[in-house]
Image (cartoon, coloured by chain):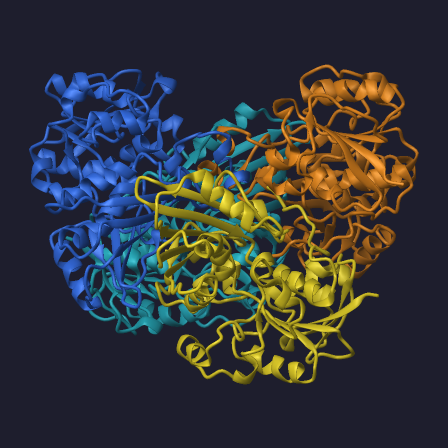
Chain colours: A yellow, B orange, C cyan, D blue
Amino acid sequence: MTFRVGIINVTGFAGMEAARLLWNHPGARVAAVTGRSLAGQKLGEAFPHLAVYGDFPITADLEGSVDIVFSALPTAASAEACAPLVRAGIRVIDIAADFRLKDAAAFHEWMGQAHPAPDLLADAVYGLPELNRDAIASAQLVANPGCYPATAILALAPAVAAGLVLPQIVVDAKSGISGAGRASGGSFGYSEVNEDVSAYKIARHNHQPEIAQELGNLREGAVPKVTFVPHLVPMTRGIHATCYAPLVRDISQAEVTAIYTDFYRDAPFTSVVAAPPHTKHTLGNNMCLVHPVVDGRNGMLVVVGVLDNLVKGAAGQAIENMNLMLGLPQTSGLDLPAVYP
Amino acid sequence: MTFRVGIINVTGFAGMEAARLLWNHPGARVAAVTGRSLAGQKLGEAFPHLAVYGDFPITADLEGSVDIVFSALPTAASAEACAPLVRAGIRVIDIAADFRLKDAAAFHEWMGQAHPAPDLLADAVYGLPELNRDAIASAQLVANPGCYPATAILALAPAVAAGLVLPQIVVDAKSGISGAGRASGGSFGYSEVNEDVSAYKIARHNHQPEIAQELGNLREGAVPKVTFVPHLVPMTRGIHATCYAPLVRDISQAEVTAIYTDFYRDAPFTSVVAAPPHTKHTLGNNMCLVHPVVDGRNGMLVVVGVLDNLVKGAAGQAIENMNLMLGLPQTSGLDLPAVYP
Amino acid sequence: MTFRVGIINVTGFAGMEAARLLWNHPGARVAAVTGRSLAGQKLGEAFPHLAVYGDFPITADLEGSVDIVFSALPTAASAEACAPLVRAGIRVIDIAADFRLKDAAAFHEWMGQAHPAPDLLADAVYGLPELNRDAIASAQLVANPGCYPATAILALAPAVAAGLVLPQIVVDAKSGISGAGRASGGSFGYSEVNEDVSAYKIARHNHQPEIAQELGNLREGAVPKVTFVPHLVPMTRGIHATCYAPLVRDISQAEVTAIYTDFYRDAPFTSVVAAPPHTKHTLGNNMCLVHPVVDGRNGMLVVVGVLDNLVKGAAGQAIENMNLMLGLPQTSGLDLPAVYP
Amino acid sequence: MTFRVGIINVTGFAGMEAARLLWNHPGARVAAVTGRSLAGQKLGEAFPHLAVYGDFPITADLEGSVDIVFSALPTAASAEACAPLVRAGIRVIDIAADFRLKDAAAFHEWMGQAHPAPDLLADAVYGLPELNRDAIASAQLVANPGCYPATAILALAPAVAAGLVLPQIVVDAKSGISGAGRASGGSFGYSEVNEDVSAYKIARHNHQPEIAQELGNLREGAVPKVTFVPHLVPMTRGIHATCYAPLVRDISQAEVTAIYTDFYRDAPFTSVVAAPPHTKHTLGNNMCLVHPVVDGRNGMLVVVGVLDNLVKGAAGQAIENMNLMLGLPQTSGLDLPAVYP
């Protein structure tokens, strides 16, 4: 049996990446794709890199029968599209930010608008299998993590869970430009972005509460204070999060490495590495590489995490969640080397 | 049955790309890899993007039994490594330039050294399936095309074969930097190459005779004069060849398009497209996209060809050739969307 | 005395580059700048790289008294803005394409709209000092060359003027993305343009007739047939034109080099170089580097020309023209090393 | 009078940038340049972007009479070259790291070798005019700051000097690749660095003690603990330092902005800006842009600093120091807009 997947908004980068990754999935196939601006066009023509799909139709709304749906719409629009599906009993993975924060008031504060379906928040499961594998498997609605939070949480989770660090945490994240989405206008024009680094939304990016919420769930009494600063760097794909947390005690590098390695022993897609990882080591695949370093001189834990924002940070993560939800092997369709150089 | 592939010099970009692409091949697997500088190391550790290979050993020489060998050594060194294998009856695909030119004297002239195994030249088959599918299938030694010639020949072959153009041909090719190979020294340093375009080896690059030889084989009496100018552009992967050939007669765009489409009707990896193709539409996959344009005002045919120099221009082409040689479906392991953006 | 310069549309890349280059000009200064979208803002605040200008006002229309005006508006809008100035006796340099083609019908054909001021075409002088120094000096209206034509014409002029080549000319040009202008929308987004090369407007770009017109003026009876193909490469600044023209006779490299060197003996900003030039060798300065190569094997002359599209291809060229028009030394304010790396 | 400047090692990026910037200096000129690997060549030929220098000779050792010397040699080699000059009474600006740390033992620890001239350390002045203008003016030996420390110190100095922050400081710095120097080998090859971000020397880079030393001098009793993590990003020029320091008390954004603005009131080259600055806003000029942000939610001060690593981070800073040492206006030759886009 091959499961049928619907992709809402295949025209964004996350949606088209899901179509790319599903092409060779052994247990699931794309059965329907929507995209209002391109409705009526063929998937393989609208996107030449997906030419393998040929004349597969892009429709305005989901058509035909599907077993599971990915939504890759913008914030709030996604919840509006997902809610009726969820209520109709269809399993949904929301790649947008709509079901990540458990608190509708926090959503309102950080997103600047009311939540369209607050009643669904309680049952939504945060879709990071390294933390929530079993809950994902039985969830009907999964909130796929944001690309920044996925990186930061995977970098920090073992230390926070083990109580190694104080709550004052800094997450300094560098992102490729595809994180800003497709055709994203003048601010992301090549001439403006090339040969440039800049920070944005300093300490007020809406991924900050998502990081704090999930780290806070890892240990009784932990209420992390997360200062999160995202940066744009001139590359297309990749996130590099450098995380800083004061250590609560003297601890050796070996002990920290052991804690991390143990934490991710059963995680197929998060790997603890011995040298500073490069974002490019994960380009196009579903890996997150984590590298913890003890700065003993200053009593600081530094942890680097890297991943491909469109794969482990979006569409690949969604497929990993889908695999768990459908009872497929967790790594189905995702067992891929990275594209290098 | 799964065929066993040996890769000589997995440490170069073409060799490691072959390993990447073979990972998910349904009918063949990497059975041995060599790399003198890294002999004794593990493939999955030496190259983090190939972590899926884990502790697969890199050896100094091919070890164990293999059904077919890819050689990705530098010019001349490759022929030296291939010759004893060929003579021992092993099927070999040479990704280097050593068996492409049929004339040992021309090899000497353009490569600046004598050919190490001229007796093998006559039986070597030029490995471009769009032209030589049957000969490849029965070959024992296949000369995998150069990345520039693959692009230029696929762009020009239908027009030359149909006798549409005069022999005075210009091939203006733009290449990503990975074509220069790994760790290729100061001239290819990031600071020097970024934000820069330059031509090199103007009309004296050793891919020029390869292009002329293969185009010349397409039509009785055709002796193309090919002016070939390669350029480096600041990207990692991709070749864009813009080819110019004077038309011998008035001809409509529709007629040219029909000739091209017909020529590649059965080619799974060369596609005639209706708009100028982008190199990025082929990043990581085995496609070559061809776009012919009639410049009626000036009586000139302009044809653009694009491909990924490490895939259709090297390792993917080698696997396509391998598939034919081993009786596997031509597209095995190569049925992939491109990585975009 | 310091001449006062007005810049119409300082908000585009060419206009702001003029402001950058004029900052340290010893004989002229920016006296007024317009930019409708930013009218009322301060130049040094709207553009942080021009912070030296501080609170210099951006106005909707030229204010105050000016000695000369640069117009950097889009096609047709520029002619509409320039015409009344010219008629009022103000000297004008049009950086747009409006006064380059001598034939209003050709303008209509290539630009897709009627010329707004055809009566001014006859007296407009094509502003390439290497060809028209004296005429520029006495002109009231100068048509600043397009960035592609400037490169191609400077690369080919000595050969065409000397009658060395046949009329069937190919100009294969590679441009940085700033040539597409500021905030130029989705097609030029970083994620789409990075790691990509593509051709566009193959043999139908409106710079083609400009190249043909100016080359045609160089020699009695010459009617060049120019096939022009522009390409976008992933860099911000720079044009690299590779030009191909069949030689009419056997000629040595030394003789061609001598013809070129002699042609540009008195040109301060065009230099004949002995190795393939890099666009980056001209980044930020007003140089054009030209490198002719005889491909004796094929009877073809290959000439590379490179320049910075915003300097010698736009704003620097305008200042050079201004210097001639105002009787200042030709190199005033333009005697600059390039920015490297 | 025009002062005569000698540049030791003009062949590195910092040395050649000094030559670029001095070309239009109104009070000083390059009088001698050395570069062992290129001795005997012409400056304008060896470096096409410096063609304005024409046949200015590159010599093995400084020749002729100079008023001041810049040394741009590698660590330790620079001290060896500077020491005899200093002892002979020549004024020297060392662009290398050799005279920055006051403690010869710390030099030994962080650089891995003994200091070649420890007796000169006491009188060397740290060349950051924002902190040490008067001492620089009268110094005979100036230690030009490292590119990372210049950025971090300028970002943090006002807060540290005012006692606003706790000593546990994080400096997360992103650098363009030119910081690694010229022709810097395989690790900095284009194919490897493009489309990649990575950290290196996490918490063990030798710029860490330099930052701590200088911040520690700003306030009695302050002993900053600086965790410094440098990153490579795929661009040529530019440093972006994001600095994090816990606030000792509630403080408003307005108050912090006022403290910063006041601190740099008389600094011509450091500017406090109201929006996150882009590295590209300083490309090619001597500006440092600083942007402090209060993260009140977490009690954290975040300060971004950006500059061009080869200008304010190296050669421009050296010229600014030279101006002070020679009694020239501080901004001589450095009053430049940035190159944008």
Who's the residue at 42% across and 46% down the image? C308
Q: Residue D309: x percent and y percent?
A: 32, 42
- Give the quarter of the figure containing the N terminus of chain D: top left
Could you tell me which residue is drawn at 60 percent across and 68 percent down? A12
Q: Which of A47 and D21 is in front in this view?
A: A47
User: In the depicted view, which residue is nearer to us: A248 or D146?
Assistant: A248
Query: Does any portion of residue B121 appear in the rendered image?
Result: yes
Position of B122 with respect to D297 (left or right) is right
Q: Looking at the rendering, which quadrant does residue A123 occupy?
A: bottom right
Residue B96 against residue C122 in the figure, above or below: above
Displayed quadrant of residue B11: top right
Image coords of residue C299 (percent x, y): 67, 31
Of all residues, the one furthest to the front in this rendering is: A220
> Relative to residue D320, is residue C22 drawn left or right?
right
Query: Is C239 drawn above or below residue A55 in the view shown?
Result: above
* Image quarter hosting the C terminus of chain D: bottom left
| Number of marks present in the image shown | 0
Left or right of B328 on screen, residue D39: left
Question: Is residue C121 visible to us here?
Answer: no
The image position of residue D106, as x and y in percent, is: 24, 29
Please give the name of the residue rendered at 68% of the width and 51% of the height, measured from the top-left corner. Answer: B282
Where D199 sits versus D18, above or below?
below
